[in-house]
Each structure stands twice: as structure tokens, then as C-alpha cells.
Amino acid sequence: MIECVVKFDHMKHEVPFAASPDDVESHGREIFARAAAGEFGPIAPKRPDVDSRPQPVAPVDLQIPGWPDLSAFLAEANSENSKRSLRGIVLTWSTMIEDLLGRLLEAFFIDHSESRKLALDDVDMTFSMSIKLSFALGLISRSEFTACDNIRRIRNAFAHEWHVSQSNVQFSGKARPAFRSLYNQYFSKTYNWSEDLEFLTRGVYGGAAGMLSCAIAQRIDQAKNFQRVTPDAPK
């Protein structure tokens, strides 16, 4: 690898970057090739403390309270990302957030089969209702409520429009304001705004959905400490 400092068009500041000829992203391979060709000046000698031999990669066991299937989900999300399927990225993340909200409500409701059915299985409990109910019960903050609703709006735009493109006025009219709101909330200090749909989906939507999912998941165990009880429950 070649360690460098890069200024990407979509970012407001320079960032450290390790360019590799085997990068899964084309821009990483391009930066390595241009740097190796001397386009950006001389390259420092290899650090003597770096072992260039292939090293075994230890499996990473990611754990967040309330999200036991995190690693399995990330494998699914990364699969959609590697396919560069924008619709797949949107639907995968929004489905996870909707599921996490159901788990959050289940953890807060009284411990009963009807509570679990309402939170997780009731077809009448829509994504929108889960968001509103979680907020009304004080389980998510006002900013998280706004972010969840923007995730939902973008999900609906991708799910209900067959032509996913900024040139599609119907799609853009639904998705663009929600993208912009997520950008303002999470990335206005980091990224330059861009109308590029891949940037908006993978960078803004995907990044916001990741941070939002972690925040909701961490609340699930906390909600169990405040689980409701029926009036006739023993003291």
C-alpha cells in the first residue's frame, strides 16, 4: 500500500488514505497506480516496521447491545454494496431500521405475546407508525425521529418508482428533500453536497442509516429497564 493524503471532490477536507492495487473500489486502485507512476511526487521508502508478508485476518466479532445479528446483517448490506445496487442498499438498511424499532418497542412494552405480536408481527404496524410510536413513548430523540422519517421517505421512493434516477421528477421530488435533510443532519461538515445519486445513496443514506441503526440498537437493552407492567402486576 501507499499511504497518502487525499482530497476527494465530495469531501470538504483532506483525509488520510491507504491506496492499494487490490482495492475493491476503482478509485483506490487508480490512486495507487497514479501514485506509483510518480504523478504526485516521490514515494518514501517502505517503513521498516511493516511486514509485507500476507497476514492472517482475525475474524471480527462486532457486538452492540440489542443487535445480536449485527455481523450477519453487515454481511448482507456489504453484499448489496458490492453489487452497487442502490435499491438493494436502500431496502436492506430501511428494513433493518424498521426491525430494530420493532425490537425497541417490544423491549419497552409489557412482557406478553400480544406485545410481541403488535411490535413485530402486526401488519397494521407500519414503518411510519413504528417511528411515531417510538418517538411518542420517548424511546428515540427528536433528531432520530426526523432521521427515521427521512429513511422511510427514501425507502418509499426507491420501492414505488421503477425508474430510479434524478431525471425522474416523481422520484427526485420524493427522495431529494429527504437526502438533503440527512446530509444536513449528519454530513454537512464532512462532505460537499452533490446531486450524484450513488453518492447520496451509498455515502449519505448508507452512512446515516448505519449511525441511526447503532443508536437504536443501543436503546433496546436500555428500554428493558423501563419495561411497562400491567396495573395488576405484583409490586
Image (cartoon, rainbow, N blue to C red):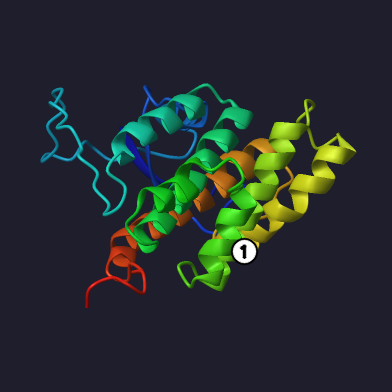
Q: Position of residue 168 (x, y in %)?
A: 86, 34
Q: Amino acid at mark 1?
A: Thr
Confirm whether residue 204 shows in the render: yes
Q: Hey, which quadrant is residue 136 in on the image?
A: bottom right
Residue located 51% across and 31% down the image: 27
Residue located 28% across and 70% down the image: 233
Q: Nearer the viewer, residue 5 or 228?
A: 228
Q: Position of residue 34 (x, y in %)?
A: 48, 29
Q: Disc 1 on helix, strand or loop?
A: helix
Looking at this view, name the residue that lies furthest to the bottom: 235
Q: Nearer the viewer, residue 129 or 47?
A: 129
Residue located 38% across and 63% down the image: 108
The answer to whether residue 35 is above or below residue 101 is above
Q: Going by the image, does 183 lie left or right of 50?
A: right
Q: Nearer the viewer, residue 141 or 55?
A: 141
Image quarter of the C terminus: bottom left
Q: Position of residue 25 (x, y in %)?
A: 47, 28
Q: Going by the image, does 193 lie left or right of 105?
A: right
Label 1 sits on residue: 146
Q: Hey, which quadrant is residue 180 in on the image?
A: bottom right
